[in-house]
Amino acid sequence: MAYVRKDVSTLTPDERRRFVRALLEIKRRGEYDEFVRTHLEYYTADGDYGLRTAHMAPSFLPWHRMFLLELERALRRVDPSVTVPYWDWTRDRTKRSVPWTADLLGGDGRRSDRRVTTGPFAYAEGNWTLTEGVTDVAFLTRDLGRARDPIELPTSSELERALDDPVYDTAPWDSTVTSGFRNKLEGWGTGRGSASWRNHNRVHRWVGGVMLGGASVNDPVFWLHHAFVDLQWTRWQRRHPGARYLPAAPPGPGDAQHERVVARNQRMPPWDLTPDELEDVSGIYRYA
């Protein structure tokens, strides 16, 4: 029977406690840092050589769908009642709203060094020391809204622009495409500065701190953000019946994207799964 992922703003106090406790437990066991290492390993940019799976590629959505499922399975081994909630950043748009509360993810970083000092993931609590993908500090950092150069979270209309596109993705299947649902949602735009960060990417920028790089998994909000992104894929599928993951076939020899992107029925590292197998997960979970 499929379980339910809820809007984080609707969680009961007990559901909040259970979610936080499960996260802290897999961190204590060393499992959580494996997720950070995996994201770092598969964060391959357009300009790098080799296969791209996690970002700047069509498999952005199925890759993170499987990544979320793996995290959720780890949490549910600790507490079978726990699921990953989603953060609707088109509605809960300030640093005083959910999920930035003391009983969930804690709040903004302090002005001097952006160190998070509130909530269960604050360094002083002794349960959330960063060990992967960090160069100088071992504490969680945030800069919600970017104090020195403010930006706002994506709006509902900006998200609608992605959802309205009936095509999943288009050639050249990277960060430069200007049409297709995948990149409009992932958010690699043209131009410079904040105008070039849209939807998914803009949220990472808005949170700031460790959410800015490949080690963004170090902030638990990563999962709530990506659960909401995953929900958009489900909504897009409902809006465009019959629309499928693209490319259906791998780019051939001579194409700049040959062996650089995952086609619909190709294995998607590090899992022995294809995007085709992850297009319908209604038997595993659904969204409230």
Image (cartoon, helix red, strand yellow):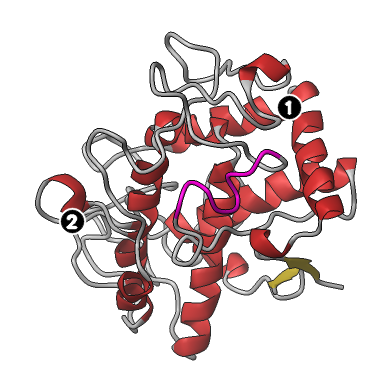
Location of residue 46 (image quadrant): top left
- Left or right: where 218 falls relative to 209: right
Residue 7 lies, with reference to residue 218, above or below; the image says below
Location of residue 166 (image quadrant): bottom left
Quarter of the rendering occupied by the C terminus: bottom right
Q: Nearer the viewer, residue 262 or 168?
A: 168
Disc 2: which residue: 176
Pick out the residue farthest to the left.
191
Name which residue lies at 58% across and 44% down: 100
Pick out the residue farthest to the bottom.
241
- Left or right: where 286 falls relative to 21: left
x and y, in percent, of residue 73 in the image: 78, 48
Which residue type does callout 2 highlight? Thr
- Total numbered labels placed on residues in the image: 2
x and y, in percent, of residue 286 in the image: 71, 72
The verdict on residue 97 being magenta is yes
Q: Is residue 242 visible?
A: no
Q: Read off the magenta span.
A: 94-102
User: What kind of element bears circle 1?
Assistant: helix
Mark 1 residue crowding within 10 angstroms, few (<14) / some (14–19) / many (20+): some
Name which residue lies at 55% across and 75% down: 234
x and y, in percent, of residue 202 in the image: 33, 51
Give the distance between the C-alpha atoms of the residues marked 1 and 2, in whole angstroms: 36 Å
Disc 1: which residue: 27
Which residue type does callout 1 highlight? Lys
